[in-house]
Amino acid sequence: MEEIKPDRTINIKGLTCPYTFVKSKLAIEDMEVGEVLEIILDSEEASRNVPKSMEDHGQKVLKVEKVSDTDWVILVRKEKD
């Protein structure tokens, strides 16, 4: 599988829900349809809630990966405005 190159990255480590989703939503709203947002976070709760919320808002979650003991990377492709 080819690696997906994000068009934009946000680091929201240290934030908790609902701020993690709010920051992610604001970031993806500024992007064009088809672009990919990389979200770096360090909350296990947010690693579940942000992808679910993104899909609930019509975006496509491409990957949720735990990359260390504390951090997750989430890739989301903007599907609609």
Image: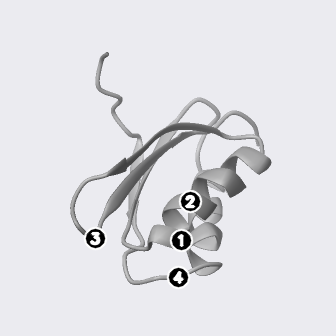
Name the residue carrying label 4.
Answer: 16
Q: Quadrant of the C terminus?
A: top right
Dividing the picture into quadrants, the one containing residue 34 is top right
Locate residue 30: give its quadrant.
bottom right
Residue at 60% of width from left, 52% of height from top?
Answer: 51
Marks 1 and 3, the one that precedes in the sequence: 1
Front-most of residues 34 and 71: 71
- Mark 4 lies on a secondary structure that is loop
Mark 2 or mark 4: whose residue is earlier in sequence: 4
Helix, strand or loop under label 3: loop
Q: Residue at x 65, y 61 (%)?
A: 25
Q: Residue at x 42, y 72 (%)?
A: 12
Of callouts 3 and 4, the N-terminal one: 4
Residues at circles 4 and 1 in contact by the CB criterion of under 8 Å? yes
> Which amino acid lies under the numbered mark 4 shown in the image of this protein?
Thr
Please tell me whether mark 3 or mark 4 is closer to you in this view: 3
Q: Residue 57: where, in percent of width, then height? A: 78, 49
The residue labelled by disc 3 is 70
Quadrant of residue 13 within the rendered picture = bottom left
Q: Quadrant of the N terminus?
A: top left
Amino acid at pointer 2: Arg
The amino acid type of the residue labelled 3 equals Thr
Residue topped by disc 2 = 48
Question: As shown in the figure, which amino acid type bears the numbered disc 1?
Answer: Glu
Q: Which mark is residue 28?
A: none
Q: Residues within 10 Å of mark 3 (few under 14, many from 20)?
A: few
Q: CA distance from mark 3 to mark 4?
A: 13 Å
| Picture layout, residue 2 above or below residue 31 | above
* Pointer 4 or 1: first along the chain: 4
